[in-house]
Image: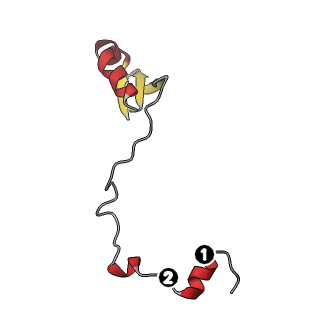
Amino acid sequence: MIQASIFEAKTNLSRLVQKALQGEDVQITTGRERKPVVRLVSVNPPAACRRIGFLLGRGDFGPEFFDPLPEDELRLWNGEAE
């Protein structure tokens, strides 16, 4: 999320609009406490894109993860009773 004061927004409006067009969340703030008052969003948001490998290194999957399921568990996944 990008936050900019009203003064910063006036100075960098083109850059902030470009960020909003790319799907970034842009908030414009006011006052010393930088209280958010406005959000800048694209009228036509970009299509969701999926990055390949974005979960790489975030999980620990051993080789057994790819083993076939046991028959009894496979029947449960297929909606069959035990």
The quadrant in which residue 80 appears is bottom right
Task: Residue at 41%, 23% (x, y): give it.
Answer: 29
Q: What number of labels is visible? A: 2
- Measuring from the top left, give residue 39's x and y in whole percent: 47, 25
- Badge 1 crowding class, 10 Å Cα cut-off, few under 14, some 14 to 19, many 20 or more, is few
The answer to which of 39 and 22 lies nearer the viewer is 22
Mark 2 residue element? loop
Which quarter of the image is occupied by the N terminus? top left
Q: Which mark is residue 77?
A: 1
Which quarter of the image is occupied by the C terminus? bottom right
The answer to which of 47 and 54 lies nearer the viewer is 47
- Badge 2 crowding class, 10 Å Cα cut-off, few under 14, some 14 to 19, many 20 or more, is few
- Among all residues in the image, which is located at the extreme right? 81
Q: Amino acid at mark 2?
A: Leu
20 displayed left or right of 70:
left
Q: Amino acid at mark 1?
A: Trp
Give yes or no for contact between labels 2 and 1 (Cβ–Cβ under 8 Å): yes
- Measuring from the top left, give residue 61's x and y in whole percent: 35, 73
Mark 1 residue element? helix
Q: Earlier in the sequence, mark 2 or mark 1?
A: 2
38 over 25 or under it: above or below: above
- Measuring from the top left, give residue 48's x and y in whole percent: 44, 40
The quadrant in which residue 32 appears is top left
9 displayed left or right of 79:
left
Q: Which mark is residue 58?
A: none
Instruction: Write down the residue under mark 2.
Output: 69
Mark 2 and mark 1: span between their CA atoms?
10 Å
